[in-house]
Amino acid sequence: MLEHLRVLDLTDERGLMCGRLLADLGADVVQVEPPGGSPARLAPPLTAGGTSMYWHAYAAGRRGIVLDLDAEPGRAELAELARRADVLVTSMPPAWLRERGLDPETLRAACPHLVYVAISAFGWTGPKAGYADSDLIVWAAGGPLDPHRDGDRPPLRISVPQAYLHAGADAAAGALLALLARARTGRGQVVDVSAQAAVGTATLARVLAHPSATPSRSGTASRWPDATRAAAVPRPRTA
């Protein structure tokens, strides 16, 4: 389906899902790893022999290349690859990318056709752009942990780490939409993906329970005055 597309993947464990989905759809995805290998190769769970099952699941279906992006030759080779690519996906911190001239402004100035997909915890810019970005922090900031409190104690984790899997799926969808726009305009764009927003929309029925008058976990619906017109999610059947 996407055999004509070339994708450069500069992600670690926070963004592998995007490239995996695009590869599954047929795109030629090239994983860029630093010397010594991607840190995602050590992401748990691990087999008894120390092999990352996470890496094998989410880095499947792609080719790979080793580039030292801390050195000028590595950065120059990446810039050349970007000129021939359709999509570049990254989950590296904005400051790290800017220091190496790999930020969207710099790369797209030389490659205006490029669709640049940036996956981060809270978006590329904004007051929380530099906040700590662990999976658990993203879940808490996105809202889904709030109903899992017990009195005044901290909320419980509700899943294995997967906040960035939701972000990766949104990133793949955003990349495809940007490519459709490029087919009309000839120009790429930046797809700015916030994992915080991704986990919020992944639990859309819960997030919008009040304004849409959807019954909450307690079984009571809100009393929003425009509930009949504001409902944005399907309402569960009641016996």
Image (tube, rainbow, N blue to C red):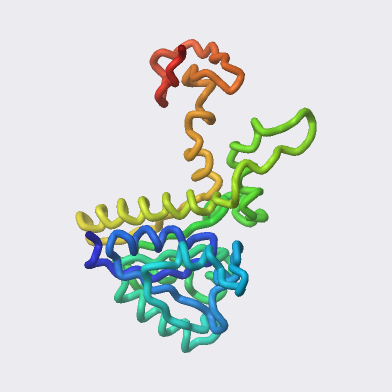
Decide: is 96 above or below 131. Answer: below
Q: How many marks?
A: 0
Q: Residue at x 42, y 69 (%)?
A: 9
The one of 75 and 199 positioned closer to us in this rendering: 199
In which image quadrant can residue 228 be found? top left
Q: Residue at x 60, y 74 (%)?
A: 49
Decide: is 131 above or below 201. Answer: below
The one of 74 and 206 positioned closer to us in this rendering: 206
Q: Residue at x 66, y 54 (%)?
A: 131
Left or right, residue 106 beside residue 93: left
Decide: is 169 above or below 142. Answer: below
Decide: is 75 above or below 229. Answer: below
Question: Which of the image's four quarters has the N terminus?
Answer: bottom left
Left or right, residue 175 beside residue 44: left
- The furthest residue to the front: 48
Q: Where residue 239 appears, x then y in whole percent? A: 46, 12
Q: Where residue 27 appears, x then y in whole percent? A: 29, 65
Q: Where residue 214 appears, x then y in whole percent? A: 49, 19
